[in-house]
Image (cartoon, helix red, strand yellow):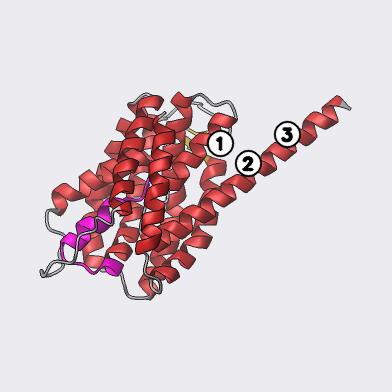
Amino acid sequence: MTGIVARRETVQQVLLLVLLLLITGLTAGLLAGLLGIGGGLVIVPALSFLLRARGVEVEIAVPVAVATSLGTMLLTSASAVWFHARRDAVHWPTVARLAPAMAVGAGLGAVFAAALPGQLLAKVFALLAALIGIRMLLSLNPSRPPISPYPRGWWLAGPAIGGVSALMGIGGGSFNVPYLVRNGFAPVQAVAIASACGWPIALGGVVGFLIAGWNQHLLDLSLGYLFWPGVVVVGMAGAVSAPAGVALAHRLPAAGLRRIFGLLLLLIAVRMFW
């Protein structure tokens, strides 16, 4: 009887984990498509909390959450880009110029993130998330300047955005969109380009974390720093909900939602910092 009860509790725990991963993915995908932000701003804190609740040490939980978040974006970014492209919102020459630079920066950023102590990485995430949250809360978004759209300084901005994004486990939209708007792109087009650049950032970050975690068995059902249940469940859920966010982005003024999410980010940042 004891064995049956233990088995039933284990199944319940697994089902609860899958449910929470589904909710995380659906929320992250919707926000990524709607606001052009990296879904990792939701995924990393959520996965860190779930892994810590399962008894995983913080030194492992945080980098695994960051790496897994990047892995999910290989699915969510592809989905969001498909729907942006159907609306002819993606400027592919700009993507072709930025993507390689961002992928290289993301790979280096991932290796650096894996080398940081988990608690320090959590604090880095918290500080950067707080800065993003303040900018969103105060609507500190640059207006479109009267210049022709072109990714000026891409050779510096690309690796920098990719590296910081990999540190946080995000697709880079929080940094990419303001950069593109400052360089003359319309906000909706900037969101579309940022979504397209999220895939090479995710790929570069995943490769970096795979290299950093090679031959390390950190968790069951993981390959190095990538927790596969999180990659698959969160990624698939995000891929399903991201198109809905994209559709809303083309219909709704997102200023109010950005302020609400900015406040939420500040609360998340405080929790992650401590």
Are the two marked residues, 3 and 2, in contact with CB atoms closer than 8 angstroms?
no
Counting residues from the start of the chain, the first of labels 1 and 2 encountered is 2
Position of 55 with respect to 74 (left or right) is: right
Label 1 to label 2: alpha-carbon separation: 8 Å
Are the two marked residues, 1 and 2, in contact with CB atoms closer than 8 angstroms?
yes
Position of 52 with respect to 211 (left or right) is: right
Label 3 to label 2: alpha-carbon separation: 11 Å
Counting residues from the start of the chain, the first of labels 1 and 3 encountered is 3
Residue at the spot 32% in from the left edge and 65% down from the top edge: 192
Name the one closer to the observer, 258 or 12.
Answer: 258
Whether residue 99 appears in this view of the structure is no
Q: Is 88 above or below relative to 127?
A: below
Mark 3 lies on residue: 10
Q: What secondary structure do most residues of the magenta stretch adopt? A: helix
- What's drawn in magenta, residue-wise? 170-189
Give the label on residue 17, or none: 2
Residue at the spot 28% in from the left edge and 50% down from the top edge: 135
- Reply yes or no: does residue 229 show up in magenta: no
The percent position of residue 75, horizontal first and vertical second, equals 46, 55
Other residues around mark 3 within 10 Å, as few (<14) / some (14–19) / many (≥20):
few
User: What residue occupies the far right of the structure in this picture?
Assistant: 1
Label 1 to label 3: alpha-carbon separation: 15 Å
Residue at the spot 44% in from the left edge and 44% down from the top edge: 69
- Reply yes or no: does residue 188 show up in magenta: yes
Q: Amino acid at mark 3?
A: Thr
Q: Amino acid at mark 1?
A: Leu
Are the two marked residues, 1 and 3, in contact with CB atoms closer than 8 angstroms?
no
